[in-house]
Image (cartoon, rainbow, N blue to C red):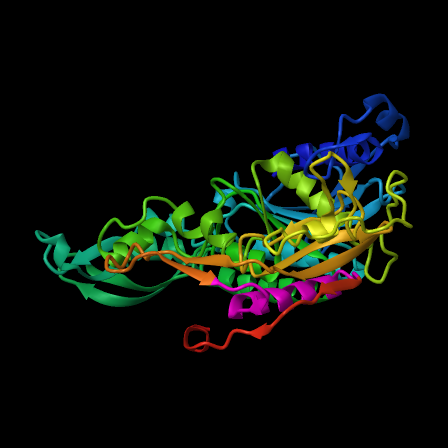
Amino acid sequence: MVSFLLSLPRSPVSCFQTALGGGRSSSGHSANADNSTAKSFLPERVFEATELRLNRKGELEEVQREKGLNECGMVAWRVTMHTPEFPKGRRVILIGNDVTFQMGTFGVTEDLLFQRASEIARKEGIPRIYIAVNSGARMGLANEVLKLFQVEWIDETQPHRGFKYLYVTEKDYQQLMQTDSIVAEPVQHPVEGTVYKITTIVGAQIGLGVENLCGSGAIAGETARAYKSTFTITFCSGRSVGIGAYLTRLGQRVIQKSVNAPLLLTGYQALNRLIGRDVYSSNDEIGGIDVMHKNGISHLTVKDDIEGCEAILDWLSYVPEHREGPLPIMVDPTDPVSRPVAYKPARATEDPRLMFTGCIDPQGNWLGGVFDRGSYREAMADWARSVIIGRARLGGIPVGVVAVETRVTEAKQPADPAMPHTSEILLTRAGQVWFPDSAYKTAQAIWDFNQEELPLFIFANWRGFSGGQRDMFNE
């Protein structure tokens, strides 16, 4: 998480270079920026971060200290970033797991810090960014009990037959009761006499057992409320398990790294043991981008953390600084507002995206589309391809876009490795039709745009819903 914080300040600088650059790349981003020009427009500080930590009352307070001195596996900052859209600064709350602290697991303290930081973002109406790299809820061990307990086997010579109970001696029991680490009852042992049969392990340390699940429920509810109250976005920079995966989904807007960043409910090794054979060879097979980007959970994919930082800032550039604030209007002087839409589709097989992105014709001339040149950003591109959704700018004003895919598309249903008799199914889908997944994608996009307070453009050219037997049965 510290390395992410160190890399994040580079992104506002990159944004200024992009905004002030001359030429444009094929993706629409400015290229070959004049670095000297960009630096002359840069504020003295483009990135300011103040760490937030829990005090003894369970409330957050600002603290100035060296990075890496956090006392738990969750860290949060109040950040001000000076971007081209908000050169005077835009505020965000940045929350992230510290995977170097007990593998980034969620304990009681981590849950409370997450909840308090998210509440600040929600109450102030400012974006909440969550960097997810974790191992789910913490299931710890009471080391003081681990050192002292003994086992009463059914047959000491055949341990595989199991045991009757766990126990401690009377001396050890008195020692453990000083910290209330266990609940036990006296029983008669055939050799040692009176011993204490362990019925419950509490542990001297808070946050070893089911109390962590209570905290997980609290932060799940907080994330659901935050999505409805402010802008939430999650960057899945590494493995995210259990409650970490739930938080990622509940925040809705997800950017996922293309390798070693699966979203998991259960790891592949546990699934292999459940099935009884080695079916899966990695977590990416069940939670990587080949699954999560194709089922609509991940909106965007990136190659590394730097690209992830840039994707977060690019997304934020379409969003108000705070709830019910003014939209960030960015007018490109090289692309005048009063201009004709020069692009006209020549064939039914042309990509409908060209209608609002524009393109270069065979003679090398630029044919402008509906929206500002280079401003369109598509999301959920690999899922439900019969609908196209994204964000763009019109006259510098950010807008949400929903369009119809007029061409024939293909939907792939992969074979289930756990069921050898299954095989991959490739479905051909007609254009201009709402299928169950694309109808849901449309609804999800409209809801997201509404939460982001963006004007909505719908390029409506539908023939209707698909209501075949498969559609009605499966979904």
Determine the residue positioned at 71% across, 33% down: 25
Instruction: Indicate whether residue 447 is drawn in magenta.
Output: yes
Q: Position of residue 351 (x, y in %)?
A: 62, 51
5 sits left or right of 98 in the view: right
Q: Position of residue 342 (x, y in %)?
A: 80, 48
Q: Does residue 68 appear anywhere in the picture?
A: no
Quarter placement of the N terminus:
top right
254 sits left or right of 456 in the view: left
Determine the residue positioned at 74% across, 59% down: 400
Magenta part, dominant SS: helix
Give the magenta part as a residue range.
429-454
The vertical placement of 354 against 154, above or below, is above
Q: Does residue 238 appear anywhere in the picture?
A: yes
Image label count: 0
Q: Position of residue 374 (x, y in %)?
A: 75, 42
352 sits left or right of 410 in the view: right
**Residue 309 falls in which quadrant of the image?**
top right
The vertical placement of 52 against 384, above or below, is above
The residue furthest left is 157
Q: Position of residue 78 (x, y in %)?
A: 76, 46
**Residue 180 falls in which quadrant of the image?**
bottom left
The vertical placement of 304 against 271, above or below, is above
Residue sitting nearer the eye, 396 or 113: 396
Residue sitting nearer the eye, 59 or 317: 317
Determine the residue positioned at 88% across, 32% down: 43
Residue sitting nearer the eye, 270 or 87: 87
Instruction: Indicate whether residue 87 is drawn in magenta.
Output: no
